[in-house]
Each structure stands twice: as C-alpha cells, then as structure tokens.
Image (tube, rainbow, N blue to C red):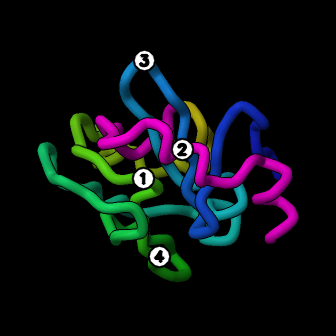
Amino acid sequence: MNHPSELKYASTHEWVKIEGDLVITGISDHAQDALGDLVYVETPELGQQITAGQQTGVVESVKTASDIHAPISGEVVEVNSSLEDDPDFVNDDPYGKGWIYKIKPNNIADIEKLLSSSEYEAGL
C-alpha cells in the first residue's frame, strides 16, 4: 500500500494535505483498494460547515458503499467535480487526481491530532 509520509491520516481512512491555508482531503490507498472499482463519489456541499468525524459524503463501488468522514473541522471551499464523470480517479490516483474536497480549517493545528503514515499503517 502507498501511504505518503508527508500526509496525515484519520482512523476512518481519509488523508489530508496542507496547501497554503487550505486542507485537501480524500480516501487512502488502503480504503480505495478495499472498496474496489468506484462507480460514484458523493461530495459535501460547497460552503458546508463540517465537524471532525462527521459524515461528509459517500463512495460507492461495485461491491459496497462507504461513508467519507471529515478529518478536521472547517468549511468546504472546493469539491473535485471531475469525480462526477471519473470516480475511478480515486482508484487510479487517490492522492492526486482522486482528491475529494478542500477545507478551510477552523484550526489548522487540528491536523496534529491525526495519524502519521506509520501510525495509520500500524492500525490497519
């Protein structure tokens, strides 16, 4: 499995990456692999205020569906609209083209509460 060390992870299988004053999030390589070929990604609404741990969307595969949870609290400021037509970006490139949404965090320091790649992998 590929879990880049520069990212932080939630125990619910989401990853985060800081980009300026925003946080990009998606689901981990482990999660997309366990789900199989994705056929649909539901993203949160733009402007939505989210709380860490809250369900913010759903990913559906040919096998099952799984909730996406907010890794940190904040406002959804961008969603990856390309996933509407190409949900397989999450399978092919979960940390690049397969990102799901961007958050303007209420407190950027909350990222420190998330897991390192080694801590995340140890919990798998």
**Mark seen at residue 72:** 1
Q: Position of residue 42 (x, y in %)?
A: 29, 61
Left/right of residue 51 with respect to residue 89 in the rendered view: left
- Circle 1 Cα neighbour tier, 10 Å, few/some/many (<14 / 14–19 / ≥20): many
Residue placed under numbered mark 3 in the picture: 20
Left/right of residue 102 with respect to residue 13 in the rendered view: left
| Label 1–label 2 contact, CB within 8 A | yes
Q: Which residue: 71% across, 31% down?
A: 6
Which residue type does callout 2 highlight?
Ile
Q: Position of residue 34 (x, y in %)?
A: 68, 70
Q: Which residue: 49% across, 39% down?
A: 109
Which residue type does callout 3 highlight?
Gly
Q: For numbered disc 1, what is the local secondary structure?
A: loop
- Please identify, in this view, whether the residue under mark 2 or under mark 3 is nearer the observer: 2
Which residue type does callout 4 highlight?
Ser
| Label 2–label 3 contact, CB within 8 A | no
Which residue type does callout 1 highlight?
Ile
Q: Which quarter shows the C terminus?
A: bottom right
Residue placed under numbered mark 2 in the picture: 111
Q: For numbered disc 2, what is the local secondary structure?
A: helix
Q: CA distance from mark 2 to mark 3?
A: 14 Å
Residue placed under numbered mark 4 in the picture: 66
In the image, residue 81 above or below residue 84: above
Q: Position of residue 86 (x, y in %)?
A: 40, 45
**Mark seen at residue 110:** none
**Residue stretch in magenta:** 97-124
On whether residue 118 falls in the magenta region, the answer is yes
Q: For numbered disc 4, what is the local secondary structure?
A: strand
